[in-house]
Image (spheres, grey):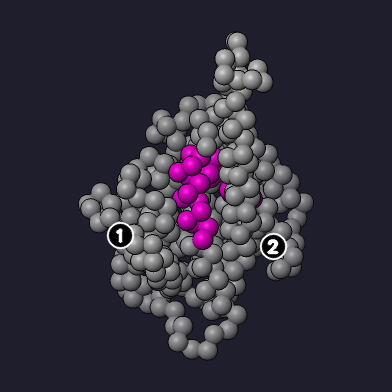
Amino acid sequence: MRPAPNDPEGQTDVEMRVKQNQPAKLLALAFLLLLGTVWGSTIVMMKHAVSTGHQPLGLIFWQLVLGTVLLSALAIKQGKKLPLGVVNLRFYAMVALVGTIIPNSFSYIVAAHIPAGLLAIGLATVPMFSLLVALLLRSERFDWLRMAGIMLGAVAIALILGPEADFTSQGVGFFMLLALVAPLFYGIEGNYLALKTPPNVDPLTTLRGASIVGLILCTPMNYATDSWVDLSQAWTSVEWALFANSLLHVITYTGYIWLVGRTGAVFASQVAYVVTLSGVFFGVFILGESHSSLVWLALGFMLLGLVLVQPRPASVGI
């Protein structure tokens, strides 16, 4: 291929486009690392928030309240209106259910029964579920290398469960399997965002709409299940952990939606790679958790699996 006539350095058009695209790719990677580290810290806060027996729906209710207030205030300041067409409302409801209410409910339940490190490793299966869902929807092409990554993730979970895993209603094995429900729904959500986000909706609008609709859906469920969390009393570290977790949820979730829009569902879901590492090490250094050699081996398999579950080239053309 001959150099482009208007290129004094003899570079081809393809070479120029690659060079111009590198800063955007590096920015996306740096953002993914920051996002994953902050997100990993919420696992520790989540465990502390459920330490006094608060019910999941009660915690999610306040998370949605904070999201609604903060994002609505920001939107009003920016003069942004919330699109309220039928398509938009259906979109907000879907994001609220599969991205917050259902997965967060399971995560809060599981957090009370397993270490933060195991919860973090479980969340690492998000890109694997994302790829499986994408294959089912035929938005991704089958690739043996990526499938090998999914199999390594399965091996990692099997190592954690171990040959003597307790699958009774109070056993670690049972709750470890239950921990996979949240990443399954996150994988569904990532693909839904990539395929169904309305053209008149940006990440902040998506989260604002999902927070408002989610709050409408969550409020009656909260009262029906007697899950109310009373924040009118003097706050302890538990209430502050709930507040911090809710605030960081708004920040990280908005960032995740932005990343999906810029890089595609599969690449963005690899934020779980960083969430896993930070969640495990935050658990060790902050909560004093310790893990068996099988768990550390499982972590290695999971990280290797995440390396193999690569996004399609078109997804990273920022």
Nearer to us of marks 1 and 2 is: 1
- At horizontal 28% and vertical 52% (from top left) the residue drawn is 88
Quick check: can you spot residue 32? yes
Q: Secondary structure at mark 2?
A: helix
Is 197 above or below relative to 146? below
Q: Is residue 1 magenta?
A: no
Q: Is residue 161 visible?
A: no
Residue 46, percent from left and from top? 56, 67
Residue identifier under label 2: 282
**Start and end of the magenta stretch?**
251-274
Q: Residue furthest left?
A: 86
Name the amino acid type tagged 2. Phe
State the predominant SS element of the stretch in magenta: helix
Badge 1 or badge 2: first in the primary sequence: 1
For image coordinates 57% across by 19% down, the residue present is 6
Quarter of the view holding residue 43: bottom right
- Residue 267 in percent (x, y) is at 54, 40
Left or right placement of residue 312 versus residue 86 in this view: right
> Element at badge 1?
loop
**In this view, 228 is above or below 39:** below
Residue 81 place in picture, x, y as percent: 30, 59
> Where is 261 relative to 120, above or below?
above
User: Residue 36, percent across and down?
Assistant: 60, 53
Q: Residue furthest bottom?
A: 234
Q: Quadrant of residue 152?
A: top right
Q: Is residue 207 above or below residue 307?
A: below
Membership of 265 in magenta stretch? yes
What kind of residue is marked 1? Lys
Q: Which residue is mark 1?
A: 81
Mark 2, residues whose alpha carbon is within 10 Å: few (<14), some, or many (≥20)? many
